[in-house]
Image (spheres, helix red, strand yellow):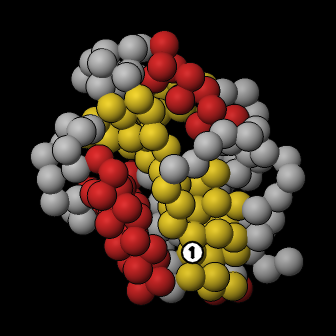
Amino acid sequence: MSITAEQAQQTLDEAECLYTEAEVGAALDRMAAQISDDLADQNPLVLVVMNGAMIPASHLLSRLNFPLQHDYLHATRYCGETRGGELTWKAHPTISLKERVVLVFDDIYDEGITLAAIIKKCREEGASRVFSAVLVDKKHDRKTPIPIDYTGLEVGDRFVFGCGMDYKEYLRNVPGIYALKS
């Protein structure tokens, strides 16, 4: 179901701010420090999962002060909806993963189906090691269990948007993280 810009603004006006822009920035600082400690000497390839991770990845990558390469992939189950469906691969990385240390960065670890498929694909493509990082880890018991190496923030089992995550294809650009009112 598509919405108008006015409906998106109303959703934002009525939403609860879970994390401010400053709190998101502090989480990205922590993640960058941990990633730097672990991967600075590994020549990593950072794979950004589109579209959700595009915005937070730009903020994270600018905090990583060591040589790395980055690329993107686009695999999604949402396609503008608020519930996931069938996994759709829209774009694959163009840089070879063979014998590379890969860091997959996604916006949110919700059910983990998409992220698990991406990690599996990286291994199939010959990555020597695969790490995962998410800006937001949603806490509930419906997850596909996968190891998350770097987590920025945690949220309860609510629909969240902002900082890359969308509400019906709007509000990705909002700098904080918001939840729909219950």
Which residue appears at 49% of the width and 56% of the height?
A: 150
Q: How many marks?
A: 1
Residue 11 in view in this figure:
no
Q: Position of residue 51 (x, y in %)?
A: 46, 46
- Is residue 81 found left or right of 36 in the rendered image? right
Badge 1 density bin: few <14, some 14–19, many ≥20, Cα 10 Å: many
Vertical position of residue 15 compared to residue 157: above or below: below
**SS label for mark 1:** strand
Q: Position of residue 14 (x, y in %)?
A: 70, 85
- Is residue 55 found left or right of 176 in the rendered image? left
Vertical position of residue 149 compared to residue 181: above or below: above
Which residue appears at 39% of the width and 40% of the height?
A: 103
Which residue appears at 39% of the width and 77% of the height?
A: 25
Which residue appears at 72% of the width and 27% of the height?
A: 86
Residue position for label 1: 177
- Is residue 96 found left or right of 161 in the rendered image? left
